[in-house]
Image: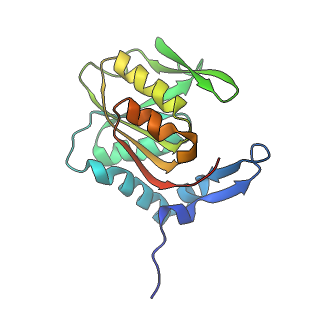
Amino acid sequence: MIQQKQVQDYIRAIVDFPHEGIIFRDVTTLFADPRGFRMAVDQLLHPYAGLRFDKVVGLEARGFILGGAVAHQLSAGFVPIRKKGKLPGAVISEAYTLEYGEAVVEIHDDAILPGERILLVDDLLATGGTAEAGIKLVERLGGEIIGCAFIIDLPDLGGRARLDAMGMDVHALCAFEGL
C-alpha cells in the first residue's frame, strides 16, 4: 500500500542555516510542488470551514504567498504586513523583539475596517514575535482576529504558547522539535 505524502514531507531541512546550530525549515520546496502546495492551502483552511472572513493578513514574506492563495479560496481580501519602509502611503507600525535586537512591521492605516473578521497566515511560528506584532496592528485598526494559521510550528521556541496567552486560535499543519 502506497502511503500518502503529508505536508511535512515536502519541507526541506537545511542544517546550519542561517548559522551553525539552526535547522532551517524551507517551505519553498512545498510551494514548488503543486500537490503539496494545494494540500497545505486546503489544510490551512480546514479548521475554518463555514466561517466568514473579510480579509486574510499575510506576514512578510512567505505569508504573502500563502495568504494570497488562502484569500482566493475564501473569496476574501488580502492584506500584507510588511517590514518597515516597504509600504507606500500612510501606515501604522508595531515594534517587536527578535532574538538579537528589534524589528518593526507596518500595515496601511486603511487596510482593515473596524469589525472585519481576519485570518492571519504565515509559514512558520517560532517565537511568535512577528505574529504578535501583526495581531496588534490588526486590532489597533479594529479588526477581529478569528484565527492564526501556520504551516510549521516550532514549539520549543514558545510562539504557540505566546499566542495562546493572547487568546488566539492557533492552527499549524506540522511541528518540528528544536530550533
Residue lying at the far right of the rendered structure: 20
Q: Quadrant of the N terminus?
A: bottom left
Query: Viewer-proximal residue, 54 or 167?
Result: 167
Colouring: rainbow
Direction bottom: furthest residue:
1
Instruction: Using residue 23 as the reference point, say whether residue 4 is left or right of it.
Output: left
How many numbered discs sit on the rendered protein?
Answer: 0
Question: Is 86 on the left or on the right of 173, as rendered?
Answer: right
What residue sits 39% from the left and 36% below the top? 164
Where is residue 112? Give x, y as percent: 33, 22
Above or below: residue 66 compared with residue 93: below
Image location of residue 89, percent across then percent down: 49, 13
Q: Judge whether 153 appears above or below 59 on screen.
A: below
The image quarter containing residue 76 is: top left
Task: Residue 78 in the image: state x and y as whole percent.
Answer: 38, 34
Q: Look at the image and tell me whether residue 89 can be seen.
A: no
Q: Nearer the viewer, residue 23 or 137?
A: 23
Question: Does the rendering let one see residue 26?
Answer: yes
Residue at the far top in the pictured view: 90
167, above or below 33, in the image:
above
The residue sitting at 77% across, 50% down in the picture is 16
Q: Residue at x 75, y 43 (%)?
A: 18
Q: Position of residue 107 (x, y in %)?
A: 46, 21
In front of the other: 6 or 73 = 6
Residue at figure coordinates x 48%, y 24% from the top left: 133
Picture quadrant of residue 10: bottom right
- Foreground of the two, 46 or 168: 168
Residue 12 lies, with reference to residue 16, above or below; the image says: below
